[in-house]
Amino acid sequence: MSTETTAADNKPDAPVTPPKAKKASFAHKLYTGEIEYDFVGKRNRWYIVSAVLLGISILALSILRLNLGIEFKGGADFTVPITVTAETPDQLRGAVEALNLPDNDDIQVISVGEGQARVQTRSLSVEEVTAVKQALATAAGGIAVDEVGYSLIGASWGSMITQQALIALAVFLVLVSLLIWAYFRNYKMAIAAIVALLHDLVITIGIYALVGFTVTPATLIGVLTILGYSLYDTVVVFDKVRENVADLKNTRLTYSEAANAAVNQVLIRSINTTIIGVLPVAALTFAGTFILGTGPLKDLGLALLVGMIAGAYSSIFIAAPLLAQLKEAEPEMREHREKLARRALRHSAKEASTAKSKSVLIADGEGPLAETAEVEPERLGLVSASELARQSRTQPNRSTRAQRKK
């Protein structure tokens, strides 16, 4: 039985193109260590940047001082029933300024819903209170003077609130330190986290002194919120550090190198979290500052905006490098680091000895003026005995006697 072949059967198969390898992303390269930035090794650079920022903040707090709201320094609070529009704050503020009361430059107007506004001034005498109420009633469209509410907030109440806030902050820091210590079982992580937390707190308050925003209860709410955010970011970094140093003695990494790898591995996550959190807060700050002009949104938004950015910065550039520095000072870590250095030195000496043994000494001439040089044996066509032993020898094909006779 004969078989017939066609041209299609004899046609060679088309070459198969292998699929292109998927290019690794930047985040993946950071996580695997293919790309790495030395955050921990360059810690002195970050310390200098933070020292400058802290110095500016402390100078601002010392020279410019905080612009405390009426809740903290005391003053007069007037409630005006009025249909709130975009011109209402300027309208009411202008009515009070027209009285030309002494030392009454800091006038705060806050919209409360759509039918009420609050006007806050310094503490006033009885005559001044009467004059301000009359001016506000006229500016509100000629309402009765009795419809303008008035309350006096004493300075002692504000100082008591400030004292209670400081006590609450101290208790918060102590409890957070104990919690981090218990969770990580490492008190140096607690120290690094609290230092980063205080760093964020001082910078945030310093920014308030620089820009002159009023410190109100909304500001305290924002500060407490950013403390929790900063701690969250720091704990994420420390958790990855703990994972990388779990079996450190059986690796060829120092504590600083393992901590730096952890920072690079969580870097993209920290950046994404910060951007997602900062965008709505930035919109909140913009609306409170440029659209409303005053009110709790303005004070709350600035504290959140500055604190979130400072918290992300301190978790990467302050907390992790400081932790590595504290741990590297331990005798156990110094011994591990010296052990790795001795191993690296032995390895380098071995490589140098191997490279030297493969060279051949060539003399040009005789006597004391003869020049010598080391030349690689391959350049002279020389092969070592060990190399010959490794090479496979092939037996030449021998023809038969009959073939040789032919």
Image (spheres, rainbow, N blue to C red):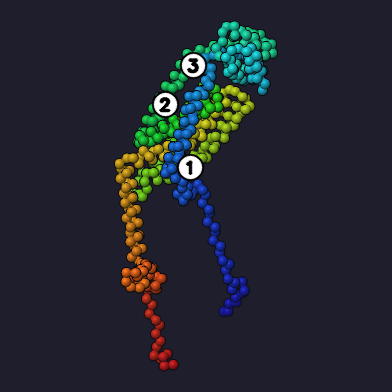
Confirm whether residue 312 shows in the render. Answer: yes
State which quadrant residue 361 falls in: bottom left
The residue where tag 1 is placed is 267
Q: Residue at x 38, y 68 (%)?
A: 376
Residue at 55%, 27% in the rendered image: 211
Check disc 3 and report its element: helix, strand or loop. helix
Rendered location of residue 205, percent (x, y): 49, 27
Whether 91 is drawn above or below 129: the answer is below
Find residue 158 and name its label: 3
Q: Mark 2 points at which residue?
A: 172
Q: Which of 331 and 363 is in front in this view?
A: 363
Q: Earlier in the sequence, mark 1 or mark 2?
A: 2
Pick whichever of labels 1 and 3 is earlier in the sequence: 3
SS at badge 1 = helix
Measured Cα–Cα span from mark 1 to mark 3? 42 Å
Q: Position of residue 276 (x, y in %)?
A: 54, 37
Q: Residue furthest bottom?
A: 405
Of the two numbered discs 3 and 2 on the same chain, state the one appearing first in sequence: 3
